[in-house]
Image: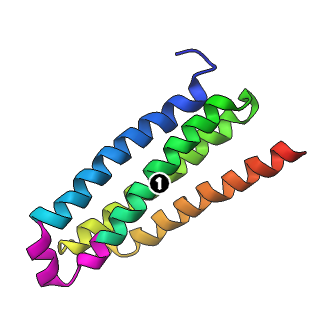
């Protein structure tokens, strides 16, 4: 992999992985697990997790395009944005999926950690945008 490609390879790989798993888990919740989630009253939680999962997969796809089109000086931050969003989805969405299926309650505090990682990624987007202006 060339240095020019390094800024968009990880965001693109993460977009593909999160897109694939987001669609699979969203469909699983809507079809395979629907009765279980309805019975537990956790269908809305599952849908929230799936929405954040898919939204950030799409954001990563946009990030990869941005990295490919931008100057290489911001690629390091772009990779950190992708890392934050990927970690955020894993902690945020995955903990909600697991809790919706009756996972251990100690997972509850993991969800906000994921939310903080998601927000950190968006904060870095703003940082890159302001750094580009100057």
Magenta stretch bounds: 33-46
Magenta-span inclusion, residue 40: yes
Name the residue: 51% across, 38% down. Answer: 11
Name the residue: 31% across, 53% down. Answer: 22
Q: Nearer the viewer, residue 99 or 56?
A: 56
Name the residue: 72% across, 36% down. Answer: 74
Quadrant placement of the C terminus: top right
**Residue position for label 1:** 56
Q: How many marks?
A: 1
Q: How does the figure colour the protein chain or chains?
A: rainbow
Q: Is residue 99 left or right of residue 128?
A: left
**Residue 128 is at least partly visible in this image:** yes
Magenta-span inclusion, residue 113: no
Q: Is residue 99 left or right of residue 93?
A: left
Among the 4 quarters of the image, the one containing residue 109: bottom left
Q: Secondary structure at mark 1?
A: helix
**Residue 92 is at least partly visible in this image:** no
Residue 88 on image: x %, y %: 46, 57
Among the 4 quarters of the image, the one containing residue 54: bottom left
Residue at the limit of the structure toward the top, as seen here: 2
Name the residue: 31% across, 76% down. Answer: 45
Q: Nearer the viewer, residue 1 or 108?
A: 1
Q: Is residue 53 above or below residue 45?
A: above
Q: Nearer the viewer, residue 57 or 95?
A: 57
Q: Magenta segment, principal secondary structure?
A: helix
Residue 63 on image: x %, y %: 58, 42
Residue 93 on image: x %, y %: 36, 63
Among the 4 quarters of the image, the one containing residue 37: bottom left
């Amino acid at each position: 992999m060339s240095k020019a490609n390094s800024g968009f390879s990880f965001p693109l790989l993460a977009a593909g992985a999160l897109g694939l798993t987001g669609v699979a888990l969203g469909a699983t919740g809507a079809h395979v697990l629907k009765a279980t989630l309805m019975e537990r009253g956790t269908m809305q939680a599952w849908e929230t997790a799936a929405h954040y999962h898919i939204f950030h997969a799409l954001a990563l796809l946009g990030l990869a395009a941005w990295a490919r089109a931008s100057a290489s000086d911001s690629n390091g931050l772009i990779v950190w944005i992708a890392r934050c969003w990927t970690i955020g989805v894993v902690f945020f969405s995955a903990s909600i999926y697991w809790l919706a299926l009756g996972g251990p309650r100690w997972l509850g505090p993991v969800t906000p950690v994921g939310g903080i990682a998601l927000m950190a990624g968006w904060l870095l987007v703003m940082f890159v945008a302001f750094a580009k202006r100057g």
